Image: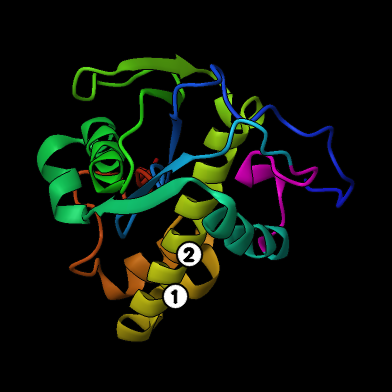
Amino acid sequence: MATGLLNEPLPACYGAGRREAGCDEAGRGCLAGPVVAAAVILPDDFRHPLLNDSKKLTERQRDKLRPVIEREAVAWAVAEVDNEEIDSINILRASILAMHRALDKLPVEPGAVIVDGNRFARWRDKECLTFVKGDGRYANIAAASILAKTRRDEIMRELHERFPFYGWDVNKGYPTAAHRAAIALHGPSPLHRMTFRLLPDIQLTLPI
């Protein structure tokens, strides 16, 4: 839970002097909507005491940091992979594809890439390193996590207007009890990920 206390500022990147891009994604565990990724190159001397893993921040804190990141970054980009692509290639490949798309959109080519997690596919000819919980270790990954999360939340609020039954303005497509109850009542939408377990297994009670 976010406490609102300022953190010791994270280092801007893993390796200074090489225009390093940090990458992260949001929405991997959701039942509906796209997976969204961001790539961010920060100045080597960038510091911000509030910047951290987006999951440790409140929505208000993320919204406050977003314009700071967009303004102060050397370069940033956001990209997505929709639910049909996710169903076609699986969520791991879709998450990596979204990060590659974000990297492709950067107006400045990075010299190296660091990614939150432990799985990634090489991008171009660049050195690519993975860091478990990297969004809590390096500011460029943390910044990417915030841009990905805030953009995905925007998308889900927009999609909620088209499909208001599922409460995406609140649950953002995650598998909450209310979301699954809505799927059981109304059926899945065209934006649900059909390869995911949308409803929990039904336990049948046989008569004695």
Q: Is residue 52 above or below residue 67?
A: above
**Residue at the image point whose x is 44% and y is 17% from the top:** 130
Residue 102 lies, in percent from the top left, at 30, 45
Q: Mark 1 — residue?
A: 157
Q: In this view, does 119 lie above or below 142?
A: above
Mark 2 lies on a secondary structure that is: helix
**Pointer 2 with pointer 1, Cβ within 8 A:** yes
**Residue at the image point whose x is 37% and y is 85% from the top:** 161
Residue 137 lies, in percent from the top left, at 65, 25
Q: Can residue 45 be seen in this view?
A: yes
Q: Which amino acid does label 2 sit on?
A: Asp
Q: Identify the main secondary structure in magenta.
A: loop
Q: Quadrant of the C terminus?
A: top left
Residue nearest the observer in this picture, 70 or 131? 70
Q: In this view, does 208 lie above or below 132?
A: below
Residue 49 lies, in percent from the top left, at 80, 42
Q: Mark 2 — residue?
A: 153
Q: Is residue 148 above or below residue 9?
A: below
Mark 1 crowd level (few <14, some 14–19, many ≥20, 10 Å Cα): many
Q: What residue range appears in magenta?
A: 48-59
**Residue at the image point whose x is 49% and y is 74% from the top:** 169
Q: How far apart are marks 2 and 1 (CA)?
A: 6 Å
Q: Which residue occupies the extreme left position in the image? A: 88
| Residue 163 drawn in magenta | no
**Residue at the image point whose x is 54% and y is 39% from the top:** 42
Residue nearest the observer in this picture, 42 or 158? 42
